[in-house]
Amino acid sequence: MLGSRRLVVNRSQSVIHLFSAKAWPQIAGCKDTTTRYLSTSHGPLLSANHTPLSKPSDIEYCRRIVQQHDLDNYLVSLFSPRSVREAVWGIRAMNVELVRISEVTTSTAAAQMRFAYWHDTIKRLYSDDPVQTPISRCVHDAVSRYSISKTWLRRLVSERERALDSPTFETVADVERYGERAYACLIHPHLEALGVRDMHADNAARAIGVATAIVNFTRSVPLLLAQSRCDLPRDLIARHQVDLDKLYRNPQSTAELQSVVYELATKAYTRLCGVAEIYVPSAPRAAFPALMAAVPAKEWLERLESVDFNVFDQSLQQRRMRVLWRLWKASRKGTWIDTSNLNKK
């Protein structure tokens, strides 16, 4: 029956996941993790000697890419100061280009060449000789102006490359780890551009990254099934007895597939509500524009709930500007949850 299942906020699971050391593996490649948390910085690390390389046309180029291919996060960026917004557009545009590698290349060798180009681009961003493209110039300015950590940008490339080499996810934990690394690394630079280097904000970013990954995995199910692919974790596929061969031949919603989507969506929803309740109140208020990436994810999950977790429902394909209203409301309140969210059990 339509709408028979409801998103559940599992409070005990939320607390366990958010505070357990096992839930947040050590950040690979970030050797200065302890140092980051010895002090809390709430001001942008601006470079006084930086001369911008990007032109207005470069910024507009990045803005258009993000607006066209990542509308939700484009809307999130509008709630940041202008210079921060431009830095976010550069990094998000780079992410769009990385995601598109798997869509435009026809061979593994071609994809590897493109990733090698981006590895070299990241390396040169931290020199005086950046690659001369609109995206590279915009990201170089962001790095120079706000001291964006190389860890996040390198991870952005390496995780997309790794996902191309190993496209299947065996367990829900694999999806969560991917979210922590491939999606949270887009929120961390936003925090740094806002001048926030804070443990609570970073923990919130990782949890939002997990939820965003789950949202994108569920969102892409119809498209991938039409290509005889499926990114949903294999343990859930087996537990709910989903017949992938049948879905590849005839992509459509089934009770088994909806059960998988429901379980994943509940995990993401619990993370988003738990973060808003536990970490956001402890993080600097300046961090909130970056953490608002949770708002579009939560809005999508609630829309998914309204159609009983049927990812093929046509209403989910429609872009709704209601998310902009929710972003504005969250920016005024300083949170994306209300009493009705926390009362879900």
Image (cartoon, rainbow, N blue to C red):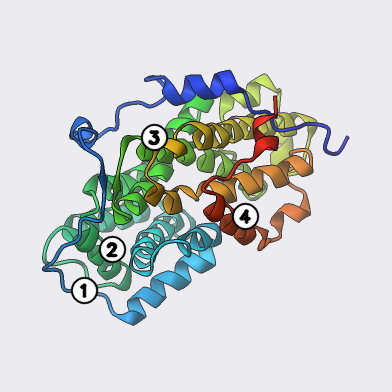
Q: Nearer the viewer, mark 4 or mark 2?
A: 4
Q: Nearer the viewer, mark 4 or mark 1?
A: 4
Numbered disc 3: secondary structure: helix
Residue 318: image x %, image y %?
A: 71, 60
C-alpha distance separating marks 3 and 2: 24 Å
**Dots 1, 2 in contact, CB < 8 A:** no
Left or right, 154 with respect to 66, comes to: left
Q: Amino acid at mark 3?
A: Asn
Q: Name which residue lies at 25% across and 56% down.
A: 44
The residue beneath circle 2 is 139
Q: Earlier in the sequence, mark 1 or mark 2?
A: 1
Q: Residues within 10 Å of mark 4 (few under 14, many from 20)?
A: some
Q: Amino acid at mark 4?
A: Arg
C-alpha distance separating marks 4 and 3: 23 Å
Does residue 311 appear in the picture of this structure? no
The residue beneath circle 4 is 326
Left or right, 134 with respect to 213, comes to: left
Q: Earlier in the sequence, mark 4 or mark 1?
A: 1
| Residue 52's disc number | 1
Left or right, 268 with respect to 241, comes to: left
C-alpha distance separating marks 1 and 3: 31 Å
39 or 171: nearer the viewer: 39
| Residue 203's disc number | 3
